[in-house]
Amino acid sequence: MLQIAQVLLSKHVPSTTLHKLPAIILSGMEKKPHDPLKFAVIGCGRIGQRHIKHINSVGELSAIVDTDTNLLRMVAAGKNVEQFSSLQEFLFHAPEIDVVSICTPNSYHAAQSVACLQAGYHVVCEKPMALTLPDCHAMDLAAKAANKQLFIIKQNRYNVPVQHVKKMIDEGFLGRILSVQVNCFWNRDEQYYANSWKGSLDVDGGTLFTQFSHFIDLMLWLAGDIIEVQAFMENLHHKKLIEFEDTGVAIFKFANGALGGLHYTVNAYNKNMEGSITVMGEKGTIKVGGEYLNELEYQVLEDDQENLVSLGNKPIHFGSYQGNMSNHLLAYQNVVDVLNGDASITTSVSEAIKTIEVINKIYASAKYHYGRTDIS
Ligand SMILES: NC(=O)c1ccc[n+]([C@@H]2O[C@H](COP(=O)([O-])OP(=O)(O)OC[C@H]3O[C@@H](n4cnc5c(N)ncnc54)[C@H](O)[C@@H]3O)[C@@H](O)[C@H]2O)c1
């Protein structure tokens, strides 16, 4: 318990070296496949409530934790759940739970995940995995040491058009990837940042962590590893609201020789305008866009004349997606399938670490990185 408390109290968990993940360890096999898994949710805010909603479709919500006791009571109303006002209290009482879902603000993810893994729970951690690489590696090591699974939420991999682009690339329809462009044109106003941890350097970490980490993950998933980054960033329109940039541009060189670009901003006028990834391949060009990677905007492929005719140039809508909160149910289905030994994990810890690595490289490359430390 003392060890756990020390980790919880320290701002950063110790730096460690990166290890490649071994083949997925299917722990949790002690349960019979059809026993419902028991879950706890730490942090019952906006996204925590989304987790709570989905957990009961795949398992059993048994406990909730939040330091805001009014919110805790409100969320618990009508549910048969244990309530705890801190993670320390939860760990002290050690309820019989299989999986703990961490839905607290960004800077708490690492220490809370490590503490829960050390206490013998599997962990589902919201994005971003952590704000620094040493923290990511500590989480990875804690999972391996405890022989427990660590899932990082990357629900946008399940977006139908994103899955389509991935399939086209993996099946060779685009040929060699030549270049990639990622555009993130969103609006975040005064009201969004008011009375919130969002916008603080220490807890939020930056626009790439809170708003756009999914896009970095998808860029890496689709186009492969990045070996070089150059970036500029500025706070152009949120000077009194947030402690870091509201806009950035970055250019990338990928390990496979492709080039890439990213333009991200929360200054889109009045509303979110676009969240898109365009891939130029030697045998095709494809763009998944819309407001949040929810439309296949165009696709022209050398080997797919039939598809080309049926798609035309019109955007294809794949259902309505509400911001970045869609598809958590599919992420939870994967958690249950992995723990029951029926599937492999959709986002490995090493992939999640790569996202944080690239975000930190972008921040490190910018001349003005708002006093960030621990970036390399
Ligand atoms: N996957 C996605 O698309 C997605 C979308 C939104 C948010 N998120 C992530 O989810 C996390 C939470 O974001 P949010 O928008 O729900 O924030 P939020 O502020 O609405 O909720 C956070 C909750 O955590 C509680 N909390 C704070 N410190 C705590 C502690 N030490 N112990 C227990 N509870 C504590 C707060 O009281 C609050 O209720 C963030 O990391 C964010 O980046 C992910």
Image: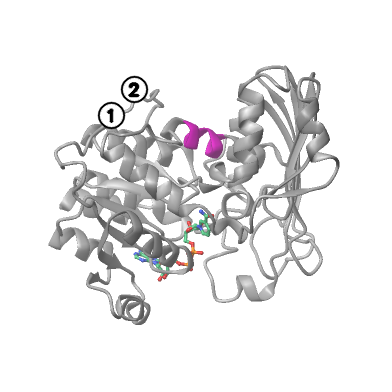
Graded by Cα atoms within 10 Å as few (under 14), some (14 to 19) or many (20 or more), the crowding at tag 2 reads few
Which labelled disc corresponds to residue 155? none
Amino acid under disc 2: Pro
Q: Is residue 190 magenta?
A: no
Q: Quadrant of residue 25?
A: top left
For the image shown, how many numbered marks are present on the structure? Answer: 2
| Residue 161 visible in the shown view | yes
Residue 164, position in %: x, y?
Answer: 63, 36
Taking the spot 38% from the left edge, 47% from the top edge, the residue there is 333
Of all residues, the one furthest to the right in this rendering is 313
**Which of pointers 1 and 2 indicates the residue nearer the eye?**
1
Q: Quadrant of residue 63?
A: bottom left
The span picked out in magenta is: 351-357
Graded by Cα atoms within 10 Å as few (under 14), some (14 to 19) or many (20 or more), the crowding at tag 1 reads some
Q: Quadrant of the C terminus?
A: top right
Please give left or right for residue 298 compared with residue 34 in the image: right
Please give left or right for residue 41 compared with residue 2 in the image: right
Q: Is residue 227 above or below residue 81?
A: above
Taking the spot 46% from the left edge, 36% from the top edge, the residue there is 347
Residue 29, position in %: x, y?
Answer: 19, 36
Q: Verify CB contact (< 8 Å) between mark 1 and mark 2.
A: yes
Q: Is residue 331 above or below residue 284?
A: below
Taking the spot 27% from the left edge, 56% from the top edge, the residue there is 39
Question: Which of the two residues, 358 or 120, is positioned nearer the viewer here?
Answer: 120
Amino acid under disc 1: Ile
Ligand 1 shows up in which quadrant of the image?
bottom left
Which labelled disc corresponds to residue 22? 2
Please give left or right for residue 306 compared with residue 151 in the image: right
Q: Circle 2 sits in a helix, a strand or a loop, which is it? A: loop
Residue 45, position in %: x, y?
Answer: 44, 69
* Residue that numbered label 1 is attached to: 25
Majority secondary structure of magenta residues: helix
